[in-house]
Amino acid sequence: MSAAVLAEAEGRGAASEAGPLFLVVAGEASGDLHAAAAVRALRERCPTARFTGMGGEKLRDAGVETIYDAAEVSVMGISEVLGRLPRILGALRGLARLAEERRPAAALLVDLPDFNLRLAKRLKRLGVPVIYYVSPMVWAWRPRRTRAIARSVDRLLCIYPFEEPFLRERGVEATYVGNPLLDEPPPAREGEGARRAIGLDPGARTLALLPGSRESEVERLFPSMLAAAERLQRSDGPLQLVVPVAPTVDASRLERLASARGLNVRFLRGRTADLLAAADAAIVASGTATLETLLAGRPMVVVYRVSWLTWLVGRLLVRVSHVAIVNLLAGRRLVPELLQRQMTPAAVAEALRSVWLDAGRRAELLAGYREVRDRLGGAGASGRVAAALLEAARDPAAVPK
């Protein structure tokens, strides 16, 4: 961040109505979405609040001054990170400098652990209270990281119920606040009505492809997803495809890949929930979207593929029996998950056929969905995050002088 950009940011902050300033830092699309919901909830409680930091389209729409764009640090995997390292370190230094200059009342750091835990350490030295939202997956790998969290984070707000006891046992001030996806309004239409609203044939079978929110994910997953859809069309008849495009992804690349195969694909930016409401089933990249698909009640197959180096390291360090968060929440392999070499078009098509077209398997799947939904509890996560931020900002012992 240049001195000119920082000076301009300071000038805008000084010109705005007096109120507590909050630093908000989010990376990928799901973090941007959850952070924006928390910002809106906080603004309802404190209309004079001001926000600055790093994020994407959702945070900008919520009125956050984004000095850095989320796309600059939105990468996954060891080899992928190395190529972006100068930008990532530059953003880290710039945000720490911004906090030192403007002294926010509190910081909301959302997910993005490799980046945000380093930033939390710097904020702690500045005396800025740190609220960390969406726990790093320390229950899956790198459990020693809980020591750094306990030292640098004032409160960790979890979105999955099993995380709170795990973290508290290791000295982290953790609280389960509920899952923010439950705060999202339900789609206005389902099935035929939803398809008609986005210009699809309302009577045609519809498959959603959710290739992720990072360019590296899309590059590795989307071609195989399209090939699986082709196989399903050959074996079971015509399909129309819907693809939600994350703000961090180049839509034109997706369109070229689909066009080369002659597939009927509708690409839309916006709420994934609306497209899932129009679909009958989905092929989903492992991540937050799997929980969105569960809440929509759509049969799914979960897929993922990373670089060989990332996969090798992951096999040595990861300590969970499932990758999909849906399966972790269920405590069993509720939905098929196909990873790395298992993710062939033939295997994906066959797995989806089993949960979509087999009536007995589909009924079993949907019953499992209801169990998981019940375990998540009720809505209100965003409001609880807002309350935690205000509590930190109003604590005289916590607010930086």
Image: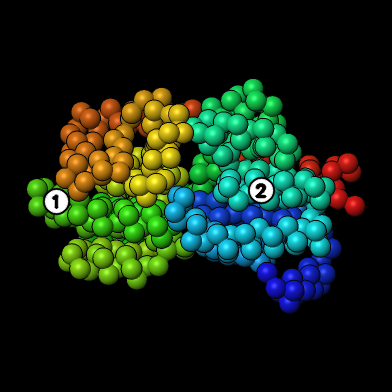
Q: Quadrant of the N terminus?
A: bottom right
* Res. 188 mark: none
Residue at x 30% of width, y 31% of height: 365
Q: Amino acid at mark 2?
A: Arg
Nearest to viewer (mark 1 / mark 2): 2
CA–CA distance in space, label 1 to label 2:
45 Å
Question: Residue 107: percent from the left, percent from the top?
Answer: 72, 50
Nearest the viewer among 358 and 261 is: 261
Visible in this render: residue 97? Answer: yes
Task: Please tell me whether mark 1 sits on a helix, a strand or a loop.
Answer: helix
Which residue is the site of mark 2? 118
Nearest the viewer among 69 and 195 is: 69
Task: Please tell me whether mark 2 sits on a helix, a strand or a loop.
Answer: helix
Question: Residue 132: percent from the left, percent from the top?
Answer: 66, 43
Which residue is the site of mark 1? 231
Q: State the residue lying farthest toward the bottom.
A: 4
How many callouts does the rendering have? 2
